[in-house]
Image (cartoon, rainbow, N blue to C red):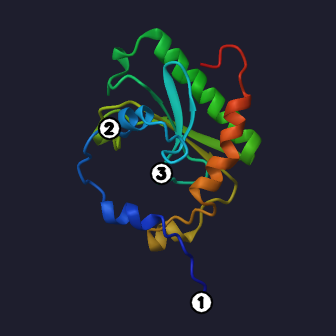
Amino acid sequence: MQHLWAPWRMEYIEEGEGVSQTGCIFCALPRTQADRDNLILWRGRRMFVMLNKFPYNPGHLMVAPYTHTGELDILVPDELTDVMLGLRRAVGCLRRAMNPDGYNVGLNLGRTAGAGFPGHIHYHVVPRWDGDHNFMPIIAETKVIPQHLLRTYDRLAPLFQEDERPGMA
């Protein structure tokens, strides 16, 4: 029998699904200066990009405005534009670093729609590869992530810093 070790998943299991969050990670984490510890890959003027601490796949990113709101109509046009430019940048960096075959890009508005932090809009960018699904999520309710978060961070962060094209948020 082979053993699959994913010790970082224990934190997710212990926190449990449906546990009420204290505070907003999308407000609190950018206030610190510990970007690598907080998995923040890049900061734009009105938004930032971070790795998801509990990813569906390696490279699972989140793009969020600094403004704390769960409603799209609260964001001003410049914020909406910068978020879209941040999404474009995220996909480009993932393409160069990890060469996925596709991406799931999505926004969950409201807890019923699946938002883990319904008070703060954030987009998910999940890189996908042909054959990246297997029996584990179906039978064992477990997703095997083949790369440690900090290794993914170290692979992506330099690409976000060098991609300083005009209009890139």
* SS under mark 2: loop
* SS under mark 1: loop
- Which residue is found at the position 23% from the left and 49% from the top? 20
Query: Residue 29 lies in what quarter of the image?
Result: top left
Q: Amino acid at mark 1?
A: Met
Q: Is tag 1's residue or tag 3's residue first in the polypeptide sequence?
A: 1
Q: Which mark is residue 53?
A: 3
Q: Residues within 10 Å of mark 2 (few under 14, many from 20)?
A: few
Q: Are marks 1 and 3 in contact (CB under 8 Å)?
A: no
Q: Would you place residue 136 above or below residue 48 in this image?
A: below
Q: Is tag 2's residue or tag 3's residue first in the polypeptide sequence?
A: 2
Q: Are marks 2 and 3 in contact (CB under 8 Å)?
A: no
Query: Residue 111 lies in what quarter of the image?
Result: top left
Which mark lies nearer to you, 1 or 3? 3
In front here: 132 or 22? 22
**CA separation in Å, label 1 and label 3:** 28 Å
Q: Would you place residue 120 above or below residue 81 in this image?
A: below
Q: Which mark is residue 24?
A: 2
Q: Amino acid at mark 3?
A: Lys
Q: List x then y, in percent, for residue 35.
A: 52, 40
Q: List x then y, in percent, for residue 125.
A: 56, 40
**CA separation in Å, label 2 and label 1:** 41 Å
Q: Residues within 10 Å of mark 1 (few under 14, many from 20)?
A: few
Q: List x then y, in percent, for residue 130.
A: 70, 55
Q: Would you place residue 3 above or below residue 161 in this image?
A: below
Which residue reaches farthest bottom? 1
Which residue reaches farthest top? 77
**CA separation in Å, label 2 and label 3:** 14 Å
In front here: 49 or 129? 49
